[in-house]
Structure formats: structure tokens, C-alpha cells
Image (tube, rainbow, N blue to C red):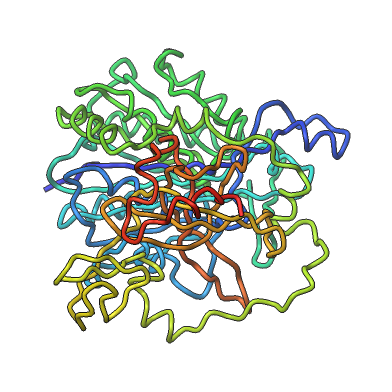
Amino acid sequence: MASGIVSWGTYLPYWRLERGSIGAAFGTSPGRGTRAVASYDEDTTTLGVEAARRALQVAGVPVPDDLFFSTPDPAYLDKTNATTVHAALGLPSGSGAYDLCGSVRSGWAAMRMAALAGERHPAIAVLSDLRTGLPGGAEESQGGDGAAAFVFASEGAVADVLGQASVTDEFLDRWRVPGETASRQWEDRFGEEALVPLARKAFAEALRRAALTVDDIDHLVVAGLHARAVASLRSTLGVPAERVAPDYAARVGNLGAAQSATGLADVLERASSGEVIAVLCVADGADAVVLRTTPALPGVQAARRHAGLVDVADAVDHGRTDLPYAVYLTWRGNLRREPPRRPDPERPDAPAMRRNEGWKFGFAASRCLECGFVHLPPTRVCLSCHSVDRMEPLRLADVRGTVATYTVDQLAYSLSPPMVGAVIDFDGGGRYRGEMTDVDLGALAIGTRIEMTFRCFYTAQGVHNYFWKARPVSDGVAAPDQVGAGQGAVPAAVRREGRG
């Protein structure tokens, strides 16, 4: 039985970089608008986790048996990054997790493999990219960071595949050799002349296999890193302009491997049942797919809204734009700054990480089976009723909470100072003291609502130390009687000293 898309999720980082700040530094004109920027504690693995979490938070979505993770900028080269995504999502150990890395086109391969696996059991494709060019270059100003994820299964599809086609040719358009941090590109005109005919051929063949014509298309998504080729195809394939999906590159940049998937997600969030969607991805050739939405789509759209998930269009419109260019360069490793006069962090211990996988990667607390008390981190002995080994794991990664108290540390080293520590009371019970990220100090207050986000705390001796941080959400501030409502609530006298 053929599989289809049953759910999707996208993620755009909190930060935006004004292109004007790049021009001010170099005396050039890199264009207007902004690009999405992954924070200092984000990489393609953490971006992928956030997108996949959003795809799986929709009610009724089946647990994937296989996970396919694709990125041109993997955090590890000789280690499977998909296993980290798998652990952060809390997927069962009996499921597979595989990397498809190296180029933008590998993202399309992840989608196709997940669709094929979905014929037998649910599968998820996670596409993530972090575009970093040389300072002052077009890749730096026009690129963007983000991720998208799609769950495929044979039942409950919101979009069925009607036809797909691929065309491949060997030519040198964009490349990056091992050890380099930025891609290189051949002359624009050459790439356009090579890519456009291939894309037209793939597009026409996908329509033929779907037994449809251009007039049947309700939504067209065209994506690729070659801006001239994409612009040409958007206007010359015969699809009316009002049916061509919006291009958000002016506000978030080109998301590379995640660009076509994010465009498809945006269409699914706006489409009605029975509509035809065509997606054309231009990268080292061309890939095209034609889908038709099903009557299940409105229900999933409603379930996403009920889960509080943000649509692509809304995420594009929200982002903090006061990121200094020098800070961006520091985060990307393109500006070497004076290190802190403190000991270097120690490399995370592999045996300890394995023993505590459920807590470290899945943020799973323990709940006492005798009295219901929730412990973070998990423990064997209940702090409330003192029962021993009467615990069950409780995943809190997807549970929101409230800031009970917090402190702003101006001395601790951080690539985005100051460091903010907070005591969090989780909805339904559980208290945690940890670090916050993506914080606007002017808006932070006792009672601020938070959600957990998967981040990289630091990298030492080539080992990434992944764990969870709290980030504010737009729910606002809780009422005074809600603050400290978790187990072991903070006394009012302490709560008033929240700024520390």
C-alpha cells in the first residue's frame, strides 16, 4: 500500500541577521531584509530535533519506526547524527536511524526513503541545514538556517503522491571539499543554463506520471540554491503567479536542504482538501513530485492549532533582529575572539551519557508510582514518600512550564552573555533548575511561560554536549497564583527576588 504524508513540522531559529549590518561592515550592498540565524547553541542536529518534535506533537500521529536525517552540514562526520535525533525524540530502540548527508539533494533522498519505508510502517524524514558562507559573500547574506520534518504512513495521509520524477546530470555548479566551511559556486549563467532544462524535464515527467496538466496545479513550490534558476522556473513553467507558493527568502534566507520541505509545509498549512501540489527541487539535477491533499488535511490543520504549533508564515514574521554582525561571526567561528580566562570545559563522558540517555537526550524525569511525585533529574528514591525503586519514566521535553525564579549571571562564560538560570515548575508537577536560551531580558519575568528546546551546551575535544534548555514562549506571564504551582513551590519572598 502506498504511503503519504500524515504530519509535518518546521523550525526557524529565534535570531535574524539584518543584511544591512553585513553591508555596513564591508561597505557593500548585500540586499535588504534578514536571514534566519541558528544561535550559538544550535546546530543542524538540534534544528532537526525541533522540527521533528513539532511533526510528532500532532494528536494521532503514529510513532515512526524509521528516521532518515539529512543535512549538508552534519555536526559529526564519522558518527550517525540521526541517533541523537532519535534519542531526543524518545523513539523506541527498535527503530532505525540513518544519515543522508553531503548535499542539498540528499534531503530529497531522505523524503523518498521515508515515503518508501512508510508503505510498511510509519517513518519520518528530517531535513536540516545551516548555511554559512565566507564573510561578506552572497552565501552568508542570502542563506538561512532551518529545518523541516515529514511523517509518512500508509493510513491517515493528508497528501498522497500522484507522481514523481528525477533527472540527473553531472556538472560543476556548487561544491565544497572536506575541511572547508563555505561552498563555492560556478558562474551564475552556467548554472542556470544547466539546471533549468533538467528541471523542466523532471516537472513535465512528474505531471505525466500523475496524469495531470499544468492547469490542474493549485500550488507550486520551486526551491534550490541557484537563485537565478529558481526565479526563471517560478515564472516560466506555465503556473499562474497566484498559484506559486510565496518565497520567504527575503526574510529568512534560503534554507538549503530544508527549503523545498519548508515550502511544502507552508502550502499544507494553507491548502484545502482535494488540491494538487507540485514541488520542484533544483540541485545537482532536478526532482519533482505531484501530490493531492485528502479530506484528512483539515483535521490535521486543526490538530496543529490545538497543539499550539506555529505555521511557517507566522514563524517567518517573528524573530529577533538586533543580532550584531560581530556576534554572528563569533557564533559561526569566523571571528576568533579572546577566550574566557577560565578552565576549558571537559569532554562529556561516553559511558555516563549512555547510562543516562533517557534523561540527557529525552529529558525523561521519574515519577513515583506510590505518591506521584516527579523528580528532575530522575532518581531511585522518592523525595516525598521515600519509596525505593518505585519509579516510572516521564518525558517532560514536550511539557511546558512556568518560571518560578531566575537569575542573570554576568560572570559565567557564554557566547551569548549573560547566562540566565531559572527554576522551572512544569505543568502537572516537577521542578527543574537549568539554563535558559533565546531570552529577551526586558520581557523575562517570574511567571514567564517556557518550553524546552534541545541545544548543544558546548563542544570539547570534538564531542558535542547536547542537553535541554528552557526558552520563553508567547503565552505571556502566568497569573500570580500560578507561579510556583509545581511541587515544592518557591516562597513568595524568594519569588520577588527573581532578577538575582
Q: Residue at x 54, y 41 (%)?
A: 255
Q: Residue at x 39, y 43 (%)?
A: 166
Residue 495 image point, x, y percent = 49, 51
Please indicate whether residue 282 sits to the left or right of residue 189 in the image.
left
Q: Residue at x 67, y 61 (%)?
A: 414
Observer-nearest residue: 497 or 88?
A: 497
Q: Within the image, what quadrant is residue 225 found in?
A: top right
Q: Within the image, what quadrant is residue 164 found in?
A: top left
Please indicate whether residue 108 sits to the left or right of residue 40 in the image.
left
Above or below: residue 361 compared with residue 343: above
Name, please, the residue furthest toward the bottom: 351
Observer-nearest residue: 202 or 320?
A: 320
Residue 449 image point, x, y percent = 42, 43
Name, please, the residue furthest toward the right: 27
Residue 405 image point, x, y percent = 49, 53
Residue 124 image point, x, y percent = 30, 53
Name, please, the residue furthest toward the front: 493
Q: Within the image, what quadrant is residue 388 found in?
A: bottom left
The C terminus: image quadrant: bottom right
* Total labels drawn: 0
Q: Residue at x 38, y 69 (%)?
A: 83
